[in-house]
Image (cartoon, rainbow, N blue to C red):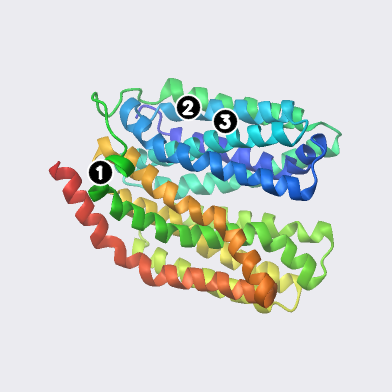
Amino acid sequence: MRFPFGPYFAFAAFGIFWGTWGAALPALRDAAALTDAQLGGALLCVGAGALPAMLFTGRAVDRFGVRITGVFLVALAASGILLAWQARDVFSVVIGMLLVGATSGASDVAANALAALGEARSRRRVITLGHAVFSSFVVVSSLGVGALRAAGHSALIVFAVAGVLIAAAGVAILVRSDGRPVTATPVSPIGLGDLRLAWPFIIVGLVGALGFAAENAHQSWGAIFLEDELLAGVGIASLAPATFAAAAALARFAAGASNRIPDRALLIGGAAVASAGTLVVAVAPSILVALAGLALSAIGTSVLFPTLLSTSLRGVPDDRRGRATSTIGTTAYLGFVFGPVYVGALAGWVGLRGAMVGVALLTAVFAVVAPLIGRLVARSRSASIAR
């Protein structure tokens, strides 16, 4: 890979998009004159578009090489601009969100495969550092979008500015990364063509889904918790997702900067810290305590999936790394989609504080099962090499 910063460029671009997305979503809703219920239904289309794209992206990476990440990022930039331009009613927003979901899902898998290749060649925790860059740029782009919106700019202008930056990163990866495909022969997707090789990675993805579910539960419900349970104002409540993202970025940078911390310690310790932080949120008597609990939860959850993915892909042959990444990422994404739904269902039954206890249970289960999947992955590696 001739472009050593390629993975970080990819995750920076991905962070720019999702920071822009979160901050500009109200403007998109207003431009299309959607109700909150209509927006909620349309947002499900992001996941509907992402899952199939994630499943098949690994095949493209293995066939054409990691430089294809640049193509997906350019497509992601274009999809955001197109959605902002055409957002006039429910139908146009639904179509746009399906496109955003497909391009973001493909970019996600490709960026992780690019990082895994960099990790295999550098022996550093490139995946964890890449996720740290992602979290950092979510914060930076969110603040930038806030400034643009405060200056009166439309959603189209916001996505156009972000799109230029994302596309520039994509072009840099496309031009500067090693363009050679890993294999010169057609390949079949590991998730469909050979379940014997795929099932250990599916199990890894299911474990990763626990971490993703807890992470997105906090991101989606943190502000609501501050408003509903602690009577915070809108401005103060917005500190919840910002605090979570900033703490996650710092934790990922710290974990990725050194190889001295064993993977097992990051998996078990991170899950334990996440559970403790979530319980602090559940019983928080004040806004300050709740924010401290959110920061602690972010520190714990932030290292779970990157470490799990890094550990599971270590030793996977080059010509199967893309499909292995796709299988793990697609399965784990289910947790990202259903984590907020899980909290909502629990909140309707035992209240929002009780729901936070349910989130703590997810990371507690992760702490128990994550270290046990090593044998499954090792067995899959042996089978992959033997083929």
* Residue at screen point 66% across, 57% down: 220
Mark 2, residue position: 70
Q: Are marks 1 and 2 in contact (CB under 8 Å)?
A: no
Give the numbered dot on residue 194: 1
* Near-viewer residue (333 or 72): 333
**Amino acid carrying mark 3 in the image:** Leu
Spatial separation of the CA atoms under disc 2 and disc 3: 10 Å
Give the numbered dot on residue 76: 3
Q: Quadrant of residue 117?
A: top left
Q: Is residue 271 left or right of residue 18?
A: left
In this view, 275 is above or below 127: below
Q: Position of residue 14 (x, y in %)?
A: 56, 38
Report crowding for label 2: few under 14, some 14 to 19, many 20 or more residues within 10 A (C-alpha): many
Q: Position of residue 332 (x, y in %)?
A: 45, 53
Marks 2 and 3, the one that precedes in the sequence? 2
**Amino acid carrying mark 1 in the image:** Asp
Which label lies toward us, 1 or 3?
1
